[in-house]
Amino acid sequence: MNNSGNTRFTSLCLKSVGVILIASSLLDYLTLALPFQPLDSQWQNSFTSQVVDRGIVPMVGMAFILVAYWIESHLDSSSKKSAFDIKLPAFILSLLLGVMFLILVPLHLNNLRLTTSNALIQIEQKTSEAEAKISDQYEQLNDVVTKPERLQQLESRIKDLDTAIASGQFQGQQLNPQQLQRLLETKGQLQSFRELTKDPQALEKKLGELQTQLKEQKLARETKAKTEVFKQSLRTGVSSLMLATGYLLIGWIGLKSIGGIKTNGKRVSA
């Protein structure tokens, strides 16, 4: 009798823990969905990833419930059974979760495809902007090379910066350390420009190096973006597929077993 009481207490504890795990997970899913923005691809990616990360918790809760019923099945048949059977709702919920995780697989992969496409477009735009900026600088330097008056203006500006740096004043105002640092950086850039204008071949070489560097950076960014998408699709997509398989099997086999038990019961009563 004591053993029967302990067994029932263990079964009740397992059922309680299982129900709490399932209920808390469903509440967590509801919280993650807020604010609800189903048309936003970023919201879809974030929601899918977080739901899949927590997808095993309801399955653990169902496992607790099934173990509790397995324990009860080993009690004496004359013992009083539980009046409320939660197996049927658990199996139905398992089927619903299985369908949900199955739907999330293609949805998540499509969202990742769109995200990757947008990321590649942004990388292309930034690269084009950087190339245009380099081309503008090259045209300015080439203009200095071909027009002596522009070179004189460059020399004059460097001298003005030297005077301001030496005196610590610019346009009649005292320079603070940050302003002085900016003037030094500007002077360094102008001196680099002057050196490049003295050697057209070095200018062409510098332009080629910058263009090659941009192409390498673009390729590295594209590779990184594609790698991240592959990792997410492998991690979230495969996990969602495995969760869908597990939940569908639990729900289908569970409902089939309940139907078989009821059928057998009818045959016995007949």
Image (cartoon, grey):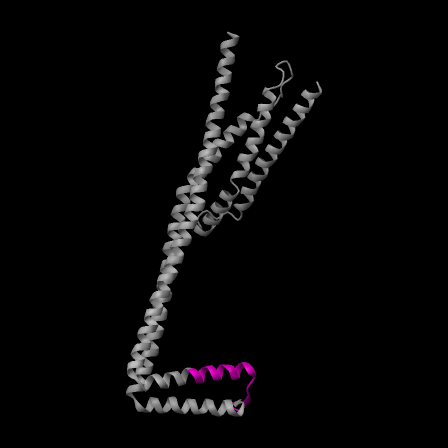
Predominant secondary structure, magenta span? helix
Q: Is residue 31 above or below residue 121?
A: above
Q: Position of residue 207 (x, y in %)?
A: 32, 75
Q: Nearer the viewer, residue 192 or 119?
A: 192
Front in this rendered view, residue 8 or 252: 8
Residue 69, how many percent across, how many down? 58, 24
Q: Position of residue 231 (x, y in %)?
A: 42, 50
Q: Residue at x 48, y 19 (%)?
A: 259
Of all residues, the one furthest to the top in this rendering is 270
From what the image shows, is residue 4 above or below residue 142? above
> Which residue is found at the position 47% from the left and 37% from the top?
243
Residue 54, percent from left and from top: 53, 42
Judge left or right: residue 73 versus residue 200. Answer: right
Q: Residue at x 45, y 46 (%)?
A: 235
Which of these two is toward me, 218 or 6? Answer: 6
Report which quarter residue 77 is drawn in.
top right
| Residue shown at 47% from the left, 45% from the top | 48
**Count of numbered tags:** 0
**Residue 186 belongs to magenta span:** yes
> Magenta region: which residues?
170-188
Name the residue furthest front. 3
Query: Which quarter of the rendered picture does the N terminus lie within?
Result: top right
Asked if residue 231 is positioned above or below residue 55 in the image, the reply reads: below
Magenta run includes residue 33: no
